[in-house]
Image (cartoon, grey):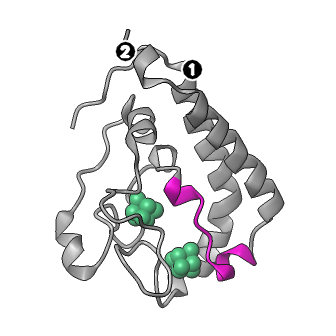
Amino acid sequence: MLPIIINDTVFIGEYKECLVSIQKLILPGVRKTCPTCRIPCCKLSTPERSIYVASSVGGFDITDYLLSRYDSILPDPDYGNAERNLCPFWKGGCILPPDCRSYLCVQYFCDELKSELDMKLISEELRKIESVLNGFSIAECMV
Ligand code: SF4
Ligand code: SF4
């Protein structure tokens, strides 16, 4: 898939910087907690817990998808994963680059992961990402 052309690059840089910042906070906890997880949250549906909004691929909505795709070619989704109830971007872990994730995927924390994280710092980072997403206008970047 080719990258998407967007006129307004400020939001793209900000979105990606925020993703990198938040994942610096999250990934140490993920490395500690997730490898031994019995019910991973990257499933399409779980009765107990799931990141996912049904019908979304990688948790993207149109805004974070455009910002993620601007300068990056994302790996092809593996829709065969659906047979195993897994996100199409999962292959022994998330195959999306850290600065190309959806907002949905960086705001899910199970209790085990939460206990490893500084949730106050993470909440601040989430607010920054939300503010970038809210400020981005698809209509304006297409004129
Ligand atoms: S965040 Fe929690 S539920 Fe998701 S894979 Fe890691 S340990 Fe499992
Ligand atoms: S995109 Fe990555 S983090 Fe999000 S649900 Fe899929 S595999 Fe998990």
Looking at the picture, tell me which residue is in the foreground, 2 or 8: 8
Residue at left offset 50%, top offset 19%: 9
Q: Is residue 23 above or below residue 52?
A: above
Q: Quadrant of the N terminus?
A: top left
* Mark linked to residue 10: 1
Query: How far across and down, in percent of the image, does residue 142 sit?
Result: 37, 15
Q: Indicate left or right for 53 with 33 as reference.
A: left
Query: How far across and down, in percent of the image, does residue 64 sit?
Result: 46, 40
Q: Please check the rendered image and state whether residue 107 is part of the magenta-colored stretch, yes or no.
A: yes
Dividing the image into four equal quarters, which quarter contains ligand 2? Answer: bottom left
Tag in front: 1 or 2 = 2
* Mark linked to residue 129: none
Q: Return the residue at label 2.
A: 142
Residue at left offset 60%, top offset 59%: 107
User: Can residue 79 be seen at all in this image of the molecule?
Assistant: yes
Q: Secondary structure beneath disc 1? A: helix
Q: Quadrant of the C terminus?
A: top left
Query: How far across and down, in percent of the image, does residue 22 sit?
Result: 66, 51
The answer to whether the residue labelled 1 contacts the one labelled 2, judged by CB atoms less than 8 Å apart, is no
What amino acid is found at the position of numbered circle 2 in the picture? Met
- Which segment is the magenta one? 104-115
Query: How far across and down, in percent of the image, does residue 35 sit?
Result: 52, 81
Q: Is residue 74 above or below residue 116?
A: above
Q: Is residue 2 above or below residue 124?
A: above
Looking at the picture, tell me which residue is in the foreground, 112 or 107: 107
Q: Please check the rendered image and state whether residue 105 is part of the magenta-colored stretch, yes or no.
A: yes
What amino acid is found at the position of numbered circle 1 in the picture? Val
